[in-house]
Amino acid sequence: MSNQLETCKNCEKQFKESFKFCPHCGQQVKDELTVKVLFYNTISNYFSFDARFFKSFLPLLFKPGFLASRFIEGKRLLYLHPAQMYLFIAVVFFFLFSFVQRSQVQSLDNTIAKTLNQHKVTDTIRNDFVKHSINAIQFSKQKTEDSITRLEIRETLEKNKFIHGFSDEKTDPLVEVEDFRKNDIVSFDVATKTIDSLIAIDAPDEVIFTTMGMDADAGAFERRFAKQALRFYKSRKGGSILQTFYDTIPIAMFFLLPIFALILKILYRKQGLYAHHLVFSFYFFSFLFTVFSIILAVNFIVDIPDWIDWLVALSTFVYLYLALRRFYQQGIFKTFFKTSMTTFLFLLLVAPLTTFILGVFAFMFY
């Protein structure tokens, strides 16, 4: 037997030459760097893309709640770690979804471009600016006169109430007649034309902000909102906003998933630690991303009818019910109630609120 020693290239410790792996750090002794080894190591290190993934994938799809139950029981080396599985499948989903994003962003820009006309700087527009400014003053004067007339009518009706006997409910419709309200619509039209003219002559943003109705002492949020609104008005493109919205979804998922686990913790407060509910949530969201990834992949080949989309949405509810039933071991009706409550709280409260927050964020920072 050879007593020669081998030096590990990784930890630089010595061991017997006959060893195939370093007993100190575990690195393979003769690990020639090839393209195959390079990509295998990358995938294996970051996603543990090995036999555990294939052992986990089919149970994830066809055995709801099985992986979460086994992981909680302590079988943690046989199957892929829930966080790793979620990360890998989420990356695949958002990669496929990026192709859909691109087409939707372009489609939105094209739609807005057809709806709104782009204005160019011309002498006519410069002249129109003067005309619109005069009209704005005239309409402002007319609006003031309308207010005075309305006040006079109201005072006359009040003084002669003993004659006509009208109550306040009948007096208000007489005063707020249609003719007075028309001036607001025309004024809005004049305001937009004035803004167009100001943009055409490269007026400072502060002047345009004043025309838009922003006060001089407006706060930082209002100024930011006005700046973004003017930026959108000038470009007539909403694709950047939609793209920013989509880009924030992966980040938002790192908050939505723990919230989903918190809902489960509230509904199953006597069953396990919060970490247990988090494990279940990781696997459930992995299932959702897997299903949606398959749908996206199939849609690239053939357009799927809408009724199939509804069927898929219904199947995820059924999957959640079966998963909760297996994982928490509760009765049929109790599980159905908690499945419905989880779905209601998440889809009708958490998801819409998150969508609104992401929408505001996308508009403010696109």
Image (tube, rainbow, N blue to C red):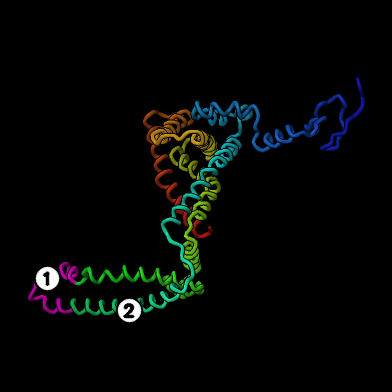
Say which of 250 and 121 sits in front.
Answer: 121
- Vertical placement of residue 353 versus 275, above or below: below
Q: Looking at this rendering, what residue extends furthest in the left direction?
A: 163
Instruction: Give the mark, 1 or 2, whose residue is nearer the N terminus.
Output: 2
CA separation, marks 1 and 2? 34 Å
Classified by dominant secondary structure, the portion drawn in magenta counts as helix
Q: Amino acid at mark 2?
A: Gln
Q: Which residue is mark 2?
A: 138
- The quarter of the displayed image where residue 28 is located: top right
Which residue appears at 53% of the width and 53% of the height?
244
Decide: few, some or many residues near mark 1? Use Cα within 10 Å; few <14, some 14-19, many ≥20. some
Residue at 36% across, 71% down: 190
Give the image location of residue 346, x and y in percent: 43, 43
Give the image location of residue 139, x and y in percent: 32, 76
Quadrant of res 170: bottom left
Q: Nearer the viewer, residue 343 or 274?
A: 343
Front residue of this view, candidates 76 and 180: 180
Residue 217 in sight here: no
Callout 1: SS: loop
Instruction: Decide: few, some or many residues near mark 2? Use Cα within 10 Å; few <14, some 14-19, many ≥20.
Output: few
Q: Quadrant of residue 177?
A: bottom left
As rendered, which of 341 and 133 lies closer to the eye?
Answer: 133
Question: Which residue does the numbered mark 1 point to in the structure image?
Answer: 166
In the image, residue 250 lies in the stretch drawn in magenta: no
Q: Position of residue 54 (x, y in %)?
A: 60, 27
Q: Secondary structure at mark 2?
A: helix
Question: Which region shows up in magenta?
Answer: 155-174
As shown in the figure, which amino acid type bears the numbered disc 1?
A: Phe
Q: Is residue 162 magenta?
A: yes
